[in-house]
Image (cartoon, coloured by chain):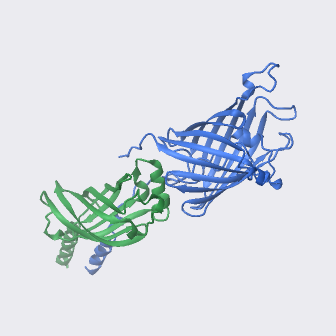
Amino acid sequence: MIFVAEFAKAQEEDLLSMIEEDPVTEYVNASFKTNRVINLHSLESTAPGVLDFKISHRFGYINGGFYDIFGLDGATIRLGLDYGITDRLTIGGGRSSLQKTYDGYIKYKLLRQSTGAVKMPITLAFFGSTAIQTLKWSDPDRENYFTSRLYYTFQCIIGRKFSESFSLQLSPTMVHRNLVKTKLEKNDVFGLGTAARIKLTKRVALNGEYIYILPDQLASPYQNGISIGFDIETGGHVFQLHFTNSASMIEKGFFTENTGDWTKGDIHFGFNVSRVFTVKKQKIAE
Amino acid sequence: MTRLVIITLFVLIQHTGNAQKYFTKSGTISFFSKTDMENIDATSKSAVCVLDAATGKMEWSVLIKGFQFEKALMQEHFNENYMESDKFPKAIFKGSIQNFAKINLGTNGKHKVIVDGDLTIHGVTKKISTSGTLEIKDGKVVTASEFDITIADYGISIPNLVKDNIAKTLKISVSGMLEPLKS
């Protein structure tokens, strides 16, 4: 009898353990603070029903010295909008002052990193974009085609949040350019983007990016892209401040038109400011 | 000897009968923050509750990530910055109903009750005491309670920048319809 009483007592001490928990799939979130690392798209998508207004600047080279106030005199800007249609699907577009370029993209998460009932070690997203450069024709007398203005990017984003503070992603990419400057340059350019994030505090993260282009595709003085920056989150805004050798903020630019050399101080200071608006409120599931 | 076995069995059965437990896996827990700047509320409809009818002991558990907000970004900040839900995945209450012995679970009726116990949020445990109702309805137990908690008590810091947007004290409401647990 004593045994029975003891047994009952033990049971009473933890009532919750009597209930078998329903298995839940927990999707890993906040691998990166926003859907951009610096220039590259991060594996994050925009939450459904959320409109993200992005204002991005890249100033001139800091090696311009005091005469240019270290590049602040010259700025390129991209204004963009991102919208989350579902958990997995994001669309967006923007306009860059550099080469007067319009761009539109679609990003779809095929796999989402998760734990619990469904365990998935990585996130895998597909990204596709089109860019239209609208500068006046450099030689209006020759026969020019609209298609010469078009650029396409195809990208896979494979990433993982390894821990609360460390996330890493790889972005194998192909950029197709309908028109290239010389025969030596390839129309299809293959490269690999690598990006990592280290979370320093709850609201500040350090980001790094390296964009490697396979050899013999682009003419000199092409440079691989290197960027480093901080994410600072303040409630509804995320400020991304960074140093990069890319002036362009879209794939076709920072993958294939990058000429800045870090060793010579060809570094742009820049920022992305993200402001989100909830267009459609989330429904609370039963 | 046979008599002893029968008595033992009888006592055992009676004991099990007394130790009837009630539970739910779909309890509702919401919290509400009201300031001049904005109102914030979030709800989870998958809270787990177990009530031991023999002793009046009651336990609740809810997954922090299960709280849903209208704004996705708020939900992310709630998990990432405030609750640190990867480190502290659940909020747990373990306590008991004070005047439970007076309640006859066999007959329908609504009773006012006092519940006190330990509430653990964000890894910090505090004693709380709250009033609520307990309604017996055709063999089921419907519970409901509302109480306030102070965010700072649970080691959750609110940065200056948003301190006007988040109330210092949250109103929590808890409810659930508990069914007999068949074991």
- Where, by quadrant of the figure, is residue A66 drawn? bottom right
- Where, by quadrant of the figure, is residue A204 drawn? bottom right
- Where, by quadrant of the figure, is residue A146 drawn? top right
Q: Quadrant of the C terminus of chain B?
A: bottom left
Residue A190's spot in the image, x, y percent? 76, 40
Q: Colour of chain B?
A: green
Q: Residue at x 49, y 61 (%)?
A: B86
**A150 in relation to B130, above or below:** above
- Seen from the viewer's position, the closer of residues B98 and A71 is A71
Residue A238's spot in the image, x, y percent? 56, 52
Residue A92's spot in the image, x, y percent? 58, 37
Instruction: Work out whether residue A230 can be spotted.
Output: yes
Residue B60 located left or right of residue A265 = left
Residue A240's spot in the image, x, y percent? 61, 52
- Seen from the viewer's position, the closer of residues B154 and A95 is A95
Q: Which chain is blue?
A: A
Instruction: Work out whether residue B85 can be spotted.
Output: no
Q: Residue at x 76, y 32 (%)?
A: A177
Residue A60 located left or right of residue B66 = right
Q: Residue at x 41, y 42 (%)?
A: A281
